[in-house]
Amino acid sequence: MNSIIESYFPVADMIAETFGKNCEAVVHDLTHPDSSVVYVANGHVTNRRPGQSFDHLVRQVLLNKNFQNDRTCNYVFELDDGRKIKSSSVLIRNEKKDVVGMLCVNYDITQLLSTEKYIENFLCIKQDQSDYPSDVEQDVMTVIDDLIMNIVGPRDIKNQSRKKNVEIVKFMDEKGIFLVKGAIDKVADLMGVSTVTIYSYLDEAKGKRG
């Protein structure tokens, strides 16, 4: 495993110990998107565990209007059981400035919300604002490009089964990759197929193929 990624394990432990049992810290290795979670402290908060993939990276981090300087802070998402989680995420770069991972801090604020007026300064929940600067947009596209490359990987696409191609496209769709403008074209180009073929993979993945 990348030593840079491993160096964040004690940071995750420190964060979790500092803020207690309602705080979870997760370290991702984004060079392996399909199993990006490599370390979790207080995993009971969202039931995160090593071997899982990223869930909120694209939709709530990279596409968040507050994404700047490699981080998005204080966004909120809801778990299946209705609990509210306040989260902050920061990208991890290697010595070449390539994005290789991400550190996420998740805090269960369900009980705190009932007394929000007393702790507004602590919650500091930010709302989406206007469009982000062009340099931030470029950073987002760079990360998305790297994710696509890592997901497709060094595969022999031409000799790979349609079923496997559908699985790859389905994974990217589920993770929000195709929410980013131009992502389908990039995937099609990398896989050596047309955009029409990618759409047919998507239809098949969604059970629309006859």
Image (cartoon, rainbow, N blue to C red):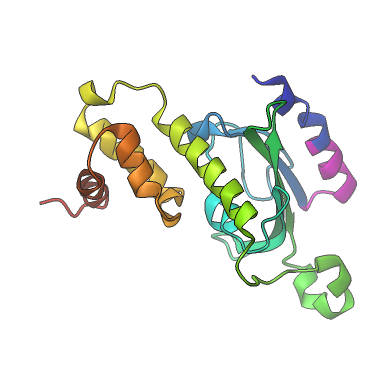
Residue 38: image x %, image y %? 63, 30
Examine the rendering and report whether any part of residue 200 can be seen: yes
Count of marks, rendered view: 0
Relative to residue 57, is residue 102 drawn left or right?
A: right
Looking at this view, is 162 or 16 the one in front? 162
**Looking at the image, is 102 positioned above or below residue 76?**
above
x, y (%) of residue 50? 60, 32
Q: Please tell me which residue is depicted at 45% across the width and 52% down the height of the picture.
A: 176
Range of the magenta residues?
12-22
| Residue at 35% from the left image edge and 40% from the top image edge | 187
State the residue lying farthest toward the front.
Answer: 134
Return the residue nearer the eye: 40 or 170: 170
Query: Does residue 57 appear anywhere in the picture?
Result: no
Q: Is residue 13 magenta?
A: yes
Q: x%, y% of residue 40?
A: 69, 37
- Left or right, 122 with reference to 73: right
Q: Main secondary structure of the magenta part?
A: helix
For residue 12, side relative to residue 154 (left or right): right
In the visual, does 104 lie left or right of 122?
Answer: left
> Which residue lies at the image location 46% right of the left edge and 48% below the top edge?
175
* Image x and y of residue 166, in percent: 27, 39
In the picture as drawn, the residue positioned furthest to the left comes out as: 210
State yes or no: residue 168 in magenta. Answer: no
Establish if 162 lies above or below 178. Answer: above
* Residue lying furthest bottom: 117
Residue 93 image-quadrant placement: top right
- The image quadrant where one finds the N terminus is top right
**Front residue of 148 and 118:** 148
**To which quarter of the image does residue 83 belong?**
bottom right
